[in-house]
Image: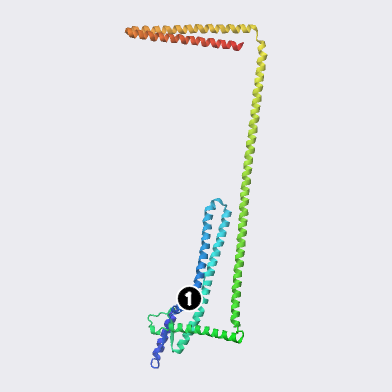
């Protein structure tokens, strides 16, 4: 673009030099941005378009936020889900992401709604600017008119060559003239009660655009409905599969529990049977023992009873004799200790009395012990007799 502009400037310079003797070259420029900022219709339409753009952006951000929330939820629940469920939910998330990207491309892509509507918004104003530039350049004999806001490299431009205000006045005047003419034609048509002529080609073009837009919207709605139906079908299949898995797990758990209960009941039954068998065996053994004892008791003869009485008496005599021997041995030990102590060291009267008391106490304890032992032996013999009788 810059090369073309420089080429045009070079041609203009050449022409100006070649025709300098005849006439001077008139060059002007315009500022399209300045013109657009001062056209009310363009500003109003641009504001409406900006409102639509903000709405589209908010819708995209909302859907992306919902997708991020679903990703976080899947990440937190992945430990509780099967690999198949995780894969299917991930596929749903990917489908939603692709839908958002398609929607974003449809709105903000190179051929999206934003570019189309901005072009539709700019085209009428650009046509008016082009028409006004041609009119002013022809009427005021401008040889070249450049656009300052385009890609033209303008190192310097004097304000006296800026015809932007003239272009703006021309556009405004044309718009007012068109409005006045429309009002005048409307009044004339109302006065003459005629129907104004309709531009059939323009109406057909508008109708074709409307039909095309409606067809595109219908295709989009059909595609969206199909995707929604597929998503619902997948979701239902996932829920059914999940419910089936839960039912199978519950059934397996119940079967294990029933098997465990059956095993426990069998073990209890076996234990109870074993206990009953042992009890019956013990009862049978006791009955047999009792009956045997009853059967043997009549067989004891009088001679055996006398023999047993003699043995008991003999045991008692031996026990008494042993008790006396033990008591005597204890006295001898005490006496010997006393003798040894007296011979080894001569005690004082006080110590001798104390020693005698201790010896006497020991003797009493030894006698008491011997008597207790004899009594214990006697009691055991008595109990044995009673038991035999």
- In the orientation shown, which residue stands out farthest toward the bottom? 22
Display coloring: rainbow
Residue found at x 61% / y 52%: 242
- Please indicate, yes or no, whether residue 350 appears anywhere in the rendered image: yes
Please give the residue where the numbered disc 1 appears in the rendered image: 43
User: In the rendered view, does 89 fall on the left or right side of 153?
Assistant: right
User: In the rendered view, does 336 fall on the left or right side of 115?
Assistant: left
Q: Whole-percent x and y of residue 79? A: 54, 51
The local crowd at label 1, few if under 14, some if 14 to 19, many if 20 or more residues have their Cα within 10 Å, is some
How many numbered circles are shown? 1
- In the orientation shown, which residue stands out farthest toward the front? 191
Quarter of the N terminus within the rendering: bottom left
Q: Would you place residue 389 above or below residue 149 in this image?
A: above
Q: Would you place residue 29 above or below residue 313 in this image?
A: below
- Please indicate, yes or no, whether residue 112 appears anywhere in the rendered image: no
Residue 300: name its quadrant.
top right
Q: Whole-percent x and y of residue 298? A: 67, 11
Quarter of the C terminus within the rendering: top right
Q: Whole-percent x and y of residue 214? A: 60, 72
User: What secondary structure is marked by label 1?
Assistant: helix
Q: Whole-percent x and y of residue 359? A: 39, 9
Residue found at x 61% / y 50%: 245
Residue found at x 60% / y 67%: 221
User: In the rendered view, does 344 fall on the left or right side of 300?
Assistant: left
Residue 265: name its quadrant.
top right
User: In the rendered view, does 162 fall on the left or right side of 349?
Assistant: right
């Amino acid at each position: 673009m810059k090369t073309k502009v420089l080429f045009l400037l070079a041609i203009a310079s050449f022409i100006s030099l070649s025709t300098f003797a005849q006439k001077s070259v008139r060059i002007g420029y315009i500022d399209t941005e300045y013109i657009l900022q001062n056209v009310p219709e363009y500003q109003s339409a641009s504001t409406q378009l900006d409102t639509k753009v903000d709405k589209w952006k908010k819708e995209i951000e909302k859907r992306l936020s919902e997708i991020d929330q679903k990703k976080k939820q899947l990440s937190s629940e992945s430990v509780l889900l099967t690999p198949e469920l995780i894969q299917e939910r991930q596929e749903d998330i990917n489908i939603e992401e692709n839908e958002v990207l398609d929607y974003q491309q449809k709105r903000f892509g190179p051929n999206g709604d934003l570019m189309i509507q901005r072009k539709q918004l700019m085209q009428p104003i650009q046509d008016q600017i082009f028409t006004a530039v041609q009119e002013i350049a022809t009427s005021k004999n401008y040889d070249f008119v450049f656009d300052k806001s385009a890609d033209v490299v303008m190192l310097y431009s004097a304000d006296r060559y800026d015809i932007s205000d003239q272009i703006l006045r021309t556009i405004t005047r044309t718009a007012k003239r068109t409005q006045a003419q429309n009002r005048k034609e409307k009044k004339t048509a109302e006065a003459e009660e005629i129907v104004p002529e309709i531009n059939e080609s323009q109406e057909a073009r508008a109708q074709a655009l409307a039909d095309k837009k409606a067809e595109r919207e219908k295709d989009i709605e059909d595609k969206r409905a199909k995707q929604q139906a597929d998503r619902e079908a997948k979701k239902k299949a996932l829920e059914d599969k999940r419910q089936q898995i839960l039912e199978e797990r519950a059934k397996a758990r119940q079967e294990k529990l029933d098997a465990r209960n059956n095993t426990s009941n069998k073990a209890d039954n076996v234990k109870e049977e074993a206990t009953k068998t042992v009890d019956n065996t013990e009862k049978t053994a006791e009955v047999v023992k009792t009956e045997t004892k009853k059967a043997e008791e009549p067989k004891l003869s009088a001679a055996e009873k006398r023999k047993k009485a003699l043995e008991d008496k003999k045991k008692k005599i031996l026990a008494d004799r042993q008790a006396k021997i033990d008591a005597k041995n204890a006295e001898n030990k005490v006496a010997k200790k006393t003798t040894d102590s007296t011979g080894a060291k001569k005690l004082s009267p006080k110590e001798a009395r104390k020693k005698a008391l201790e010896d006497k106490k020991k003797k009493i304890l030894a006698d008491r012990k011997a008597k207790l032992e004899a009594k214990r032996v006697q009691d055991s013999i008595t109990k044995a007799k009673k038991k035999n009788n």
